[in-house]
Image (tube, grey):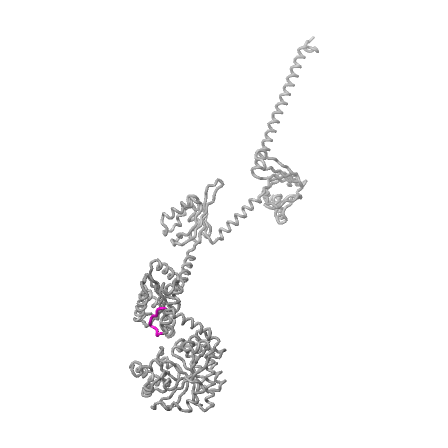
């Protein structure tokens, strides 16, 4: 019998037990191995999850998973509240719970469809969204891709990321705005580093400096340095900028073509988070033209553009400064107010262009007379002022004025070889004797100058306090003159004219008189210039013309039908275009024939505006009125000019009649005027005849008529008829 096959054999049982043990051990080992592998895989999965969390947390991205079949979205995001333990939040919601801004919905849907169809490799969209529970709109950038497809190949699942880009879009928007602002700025803007190398420039920089960006980027800012500033200036500017972080001021720079320009530069630093200055922003404006315009305005504000001399503004400043110096040195200042005699007549006769050249020549002469240490200024027109500093006495100012008058004895040259002789009238005031302030010194010198003109021109007068009384009286009379017609204070006196041929009265001249209850009898030489200045002469002149024609109408009724009457006309009346119509209206109103009226005009009136005067005279002649030149010989009339005027009479000025018998020059001039008048077919009248000797001399030299106190003084209208009809004047010495 075989023992191995025997049941219950101990050997067999032992083997079976060993095999079972081995099987158990193997099973346990396999179980443990599987557990270890599971643990490793779990650790790896956990590690990958952590890495995913960190990646999502670090990137700011959020993960989404969209199931097209269920229309559900799984939204995974990581909290950024903790760096050590990021928290993952997973949300699940229906796709319709995600609200997309209505303005962006179409483009999001279109992009999604394009990807599902395979037209685009990925889905990408930037749009506004918010959850259904409601928050403010925010911008997001979504990206995704199909990750699963069904058996039919159609997409069933799309996954991707989404990121909130609201802040970055705002920053980008602001960056674009800033970039556009820089491009559109008129100011040049440049960015450079601590080594003063350009990093960027805007278009205005190119326009102003001529440098394209490629010309200057990474190059030193010294490419703009101007030679007008030395090296030390630029070194100090850079040092101050590095020290203070900012610099501003005006400096010259050089353009690409070498042209230099003045600019206003403002530089400020841009700091890093650690406080270090890494870059600098420079803003510069080209102010060359602005500065030039400012200088021109400053020049025009202080200098006369015609002559280049200081004007009134700068003159006042210089006198004020001179007063300070004179007070400190205990010296005097002389202010000479210079006015050119009869310059208006010369200016009008030669033309304003020539007049300007003469003024420039006069200014050159005055500047040379004053010298570099004194001031010569032009106030206006032909008025100039000299300021003489460091004078010891009043007499020194007077002596200087006399030397200045002598300096004008030589002709003033203008143009090419053209010359003219001009004399000045000078008024003098002295600091501190006459006034303490600049404006008062000028005013007083001006007052003295008018007195110099009044006493005969081509002389100088020192200011006196009594002159102010004349000025005050002038102002008082000017005010009273405005009511003179309303108060019926004016009257006319009439002075007869005698014909030396027929020994008969040839006419009468109406002379204006003013008797004021407050100021008494006022001479015409005082109030007529005031009436012309204020414009009252227009009303007064029409009143005088009307009164004279009324008087003539009365004389004609008394039988003096052949008697003419003469009325004086001012320049203002003549130059007003309506005066011929005034004359016609008065003649029609009073019934006086036009040929019985004579209008008398002085030479200066005719020469003020010869062209306009000639037009008016032609109108008067068409009316039939006779015209006479009064005070002939004192102006600048030429024979050629007289030939063109439709005048009928010359009246020789009294100045030539006074010394007729003793002064050979006056006699020669009077003889010449008589001969010239007769050659032109004019009646010649001598004014101011006061002696029989004068009357006889004039008769012997064939003067036509005389007028003056030897014949009769001016008289009221009521006495004229009696004077002529009684022939009381016939008792005068016979010729």
Q: Is residue 662 left or right of residue 129?
A: left
- Whole-percent x and y of residue 251? 40, 52
- Whole-percent x and y of residue 601? 40, 80
Decide whether residue 460 is among the magenta residues: yes
Q: Quadrant of the N terminus?
A: top right
- Whole-percent x and y of residue 193? 44, 44
Q: Is residue 45 left or right of residue 489?
A: right
In this rendering, the answer to whether 160 lies above or below 396 is: above
- Residue stretch in magenta: 455-463
In this rendering, the answer to whether 250 lies above or below 315 is: above
Question: In the rendered image, is residue 85 in sight?
Answer: yes
- Whole-percent x and y of residue 732? 36, 89
Majority secondary structure in the magenta region:
loop
> For this rendering, which residue is in front, 694 or 5?
694
Query: How many callouts does the rendering have?
Result: 0
In this rendering, the answer to whether 482 lies above or below 677 is: above
């Amino acid at each position: 019998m075989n023992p191995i096959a025997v049941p219950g054999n101990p050997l067999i049982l032992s083997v079976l037990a060993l095999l079972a043990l081995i099987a158990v051990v193997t099973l346990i080992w396999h179980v443990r191995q599987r557990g270890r592998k599971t643990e490793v895989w779990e650790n790896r999965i956990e590690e990958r999850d952590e890495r995913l969390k960190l990646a999502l947390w670090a990137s700011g991205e959020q993960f989404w998973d969209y199931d097209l079949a269920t229309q559900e979205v799984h939204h995974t995001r990581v909290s950024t509240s903790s760096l050590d333990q990021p928290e993952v939040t997973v949300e699940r919601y229906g796709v319709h719970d995600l609200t997309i801004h209505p303005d962006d919905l179409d483009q999001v849907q279109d992009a999604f469809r394009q990807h599902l169809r395979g037209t685009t490799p990925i889905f990408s969209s930037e749009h506004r969204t918010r959850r259904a529970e409601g928050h403010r709109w925010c911008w997001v950038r979504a990206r995704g891709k199909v990750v699963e497809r069904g058996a039919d190949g159609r997409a069933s699942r799309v996954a991707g990321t989404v990121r909130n880009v609201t802040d970055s879009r705002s920053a980008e928007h602001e960056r674009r705005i800033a970039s556009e602002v820089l491009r559109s700025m008129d100011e040049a803007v440049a960015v450079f580093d601590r080594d003063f190398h350009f990093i960027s420039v805007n278009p205005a920089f190119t326009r102003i400096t001529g440098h394209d960006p490629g010309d200057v980027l990474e190059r030193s800012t010294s490419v703009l340095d101007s030679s007008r500033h030395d090296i030390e200036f630029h070194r100090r500017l850079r040092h101050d900028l590095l020290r203070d972080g900012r610099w501003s001021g005006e400096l010259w720079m050089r353009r690409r073509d070498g042209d230099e320009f003045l600019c206003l530069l403002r530089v400020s630093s841009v700091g890093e988070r650690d406080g270090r200055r890494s870059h600098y922003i420079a803003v510069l404006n080209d102010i060359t033209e602005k500065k030039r315009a400012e200088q021109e305005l400053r020049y025009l504000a202080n200098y006369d553009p015609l002559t280049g001399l200081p004007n009134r503004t700068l003159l006042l400043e210089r006198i004020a400064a001179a007063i300070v110096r004179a007070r400190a040195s205990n010296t005097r200042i002389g202010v000479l107010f210079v006015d050119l005699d009869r310059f208006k007549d010369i200016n009008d006769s030669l033309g304003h262009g020539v007049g300007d050249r003469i003024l420039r020549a006069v200014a050159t002469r005055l500047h040379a007379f004053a010298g570099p240490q004194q001031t010569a200024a032009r106030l206006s027109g032909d008025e100039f002022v000299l300021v003489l500093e460091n004078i010891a006495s009043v007499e020194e100012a007077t002596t200087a004025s006399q030397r200045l008058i002598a300096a004008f004895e030589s002709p003033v040259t203008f143009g090419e070889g053209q010359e003219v002789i001009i004399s000045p009238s000078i008024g003098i005031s002295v600091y501190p004797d006459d006034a303490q302030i600049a404006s008062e010194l000028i005013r007083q010198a001006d007052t003295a100058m008018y007195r110099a003109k009044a006493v005969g021109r081509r002389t100088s007068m020192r200011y006196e306090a009594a002159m102010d009384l004349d000025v005050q009286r002038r102002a008082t009379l000017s005010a009273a003159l405005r009511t003179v017609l309303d108060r019926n204070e004016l009257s006319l006196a009439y002075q007869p004219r005698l014909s030396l041929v027929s020994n008969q009265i040839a006419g009468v001249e109406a002379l204006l008189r003013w008797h004021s209850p407050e100021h008494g009898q006022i001479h015409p030489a005082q109030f007529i210039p005031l009436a012309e200045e204020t414009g009252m002469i227009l009303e007064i002149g029409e009143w005088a013309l009307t009164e004279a024609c009324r008087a003539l109408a009365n004389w004609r009724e008394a039988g003096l039908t052949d008697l003419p009457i003469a009325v004086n006309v001012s320049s203002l009346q003549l130059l007003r275009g309506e005066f011929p119509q005034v004359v016609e209206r008065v003649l029609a109103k009073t019934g006086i024939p036009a040929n019985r009226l004579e209008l008398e005009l002085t030479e200066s009136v005719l020469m003020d505006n010869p062209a306009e005067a000639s037009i008016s005279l032609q109108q008067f002649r068409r009316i039939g009125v006779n015209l006479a030149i009064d005070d002939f010989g004192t102006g600048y009339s030429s024979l050629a000019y007289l030939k063109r005027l439709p005048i009928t009479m010359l009246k020789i000025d009294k100045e030539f009649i006074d010394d007729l018998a003793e002064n050979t020059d006056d006699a020669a001039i009077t003889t010449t005027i008589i001969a010239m008048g007769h050659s032109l077919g004019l009646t010649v009248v001598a004014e101011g005849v006061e002696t029989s000797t004068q009357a006889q001399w004039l008769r012997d030299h064939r003067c036509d008529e005389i007028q003056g106190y030897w014949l009769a003084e001016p008289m009221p209208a009521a006495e004229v008829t009696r004077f002529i009809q009684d022939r009381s004047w016939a008792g005068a010495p016979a010729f």
